[in-house]
Amino acid sequence: MEKRISSEILQSYPCYDKRKVDDLLAAEADADTRKIVVLDDDPTGIQTVHDVSVYTDWSLESIGRGFEEKNKLFFILTNSRGFTKEQTAKAHWEIGKRVDQTAKEKELKYLIVSRGDSTLRGHYPLETEVLKEVQEEQNPWKVDGEILCPFFSEGGRFTIDNVHYVQYGSELVPAGETEFAGDKTFGYHSSNLCGYIEEKTKGRFRADSVVRISLEDLRGMKLDKITEQLLAVKGFQKIIVNAVDEYDIKVFCIALYRAMGKGKHYIFRTAAAFVKALGNISNKPLLTRDEMITAAGRTAGIVVIGSHTEKTTMQLEELKKTVGLQFVEMNSDLVLVAGGLEREAERIRTVCENAVREGKTVVVYTKRRLLSIENDTKEAALLRSLKISEAVMSLVEKLEVTPGFIVSKGGITSSDIGTKALRVKCAQVLGQIRPGVPVWRIGDESKFPQLPYVIFPGNVGEVTTLREAVELLMIY
């Protein structure tokens, strides 16, 4: 079993010549004409980027618009973390075929990145295996390798000596020992990514067959060696990337572009930091209130908290210290009562409308204690969570007042509110209100055109981060 280690190790590695790395990556990225299509299994994957588009469906029209953009990449929100296995397979088969069809029509090459959770939850390896099958069916080439890179510094996720860690204060805890590994739907045991791959593929890809990109080689700028490692893979072999800093990913992407330039094909299962590096997207300062809220007179907002992670609950308790907020608990246990959740959502919607009319920001949150049912199954638990999310979504969908902003906490909750309640088809990512916390400017086709929509992942931030974000948006 892997041991917990001090976070001081993050500062122990040699530094990069950052200008040199940036110049090398820019040269490789600019020379590569592939369109990067990022499939996001919940809305939080845009938490490192800015000024890119997010499409909330995968129609040929939306995919075509994405390919026509000048940007190197665009996102398609699948929300597949809230899907059953069957729904996930169907969606990824459709997306894979439509992306390939669109690329051929426009005579462009493409890459597909499966953006997954930085704490290793989600439909892995199902999603990337479906994408591999559909690409190989449509093309004469084979997918040589699959690259896994769950590093995400803004959320305190680091990979060291092939072990993935989650930071808690001054300690790095192996991911397999965290609450995330105990997820009822997507749980796992191994913190070592090689073992995680063997576990999740049920032994089809053994731990000792995994190619490891080491921190020592990355910090040593051993680009030729890393490129050779990538060129040697075949048969959908797995590659894991160790990383504790965004420049580790940038160096890896330089070698990756060189390997792809020599004809190799890869599929990617990564967290958000990898997307930023692969797309060579620049840094941007945290957003100000004026950059987010542009409509005069809109002061009060709505905060919706669906995530049940321990971090979210702690952040909610801290938020309760903010003066001037109104808090409303949704009795999510009513999911067991026919019609109960619908009536509860209607009650809360009335409270929200009255609060916003009075200029008061309201915080709606589901019960913090997870419902426990005897002889429960993963599928049943997932379906219940979807019903609860549906009820939360409906109270926003039926709002008859326009808030100044909406903050949504939790992946499934954020997706349902964005796509169903707000009816967003395409949004622009403004940037981040806090590290790892993205903001959409929702399109004119939506329920509240141009509204700032803050997508706050359930597992991101310090105890005070949610409070800081909400207070920034409020006017006292």
Image: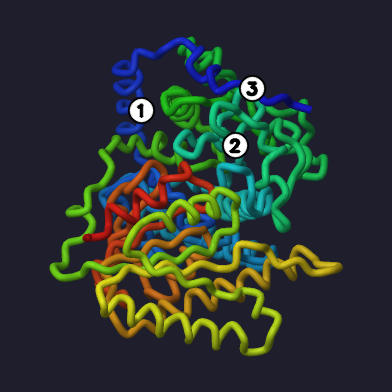
Q: Is residue 116 left or right of residue 430?
A: right
Mark with earlier residue (3, 2): 3
User: Could you tell me residue 429's position as x and y percent?
Assistant: 31, 53
Mark with earlier residue (3, 1): 3
Q: Are marks 3 and 2 in contact (CB under 8 Å)?
A: no
Q: Are marks 1 and 2 in contact (CB under 8 Å)?
A: no
Q: Quadrant of residue 217?
A: top right
| Marks 1/2: CA–CA distance | 21 Å
User: Could you tell me residue 457's position as x and y percent?
Assistant: 48, 52
Question: Viewer-nearest of labels 3 and 2?
Answer: 3
Question: Viewer-nearest of labels 1 and 2?
Answer: 2
| Marks 3/2: CA–CA distance | 22 Å
- Tell me the amino acid under the disc marked 3: Ile
Q: Is residue 177 left or right of residue 76?
A: right
Quadrant of the rendering where the N terminus is positioned = top right
**Residue 5, disc:** 3
Residue on which the image places disc 2: 148
Question: Viewer-nearest of labels 3 and 1?
Answer: 3
Q: Quadrant of residue 31?
A: top left
Asked whether residue 109 is in view, the answer is no
Quadrant of the rendering where the C terminus is positioned = bottom left
Q: Is residue 13 left or right of residue 446?
A: right
- Tell me the amino acid under the disc marked 1: Glu
Mark with earlier residue (1, 2): 1
Of residues 353 and 75, the one drawn nearer to the viewer in this rendering: 353
- Tell me the amino acid under the disc marked 2: Leu
Residue on which the image places disc 1: 28
User: Could you tell me residue 442's position as x and y percent?
Assistant: 30, 65
At a point 27% along the width and 77% down the height, the residue shown is 402
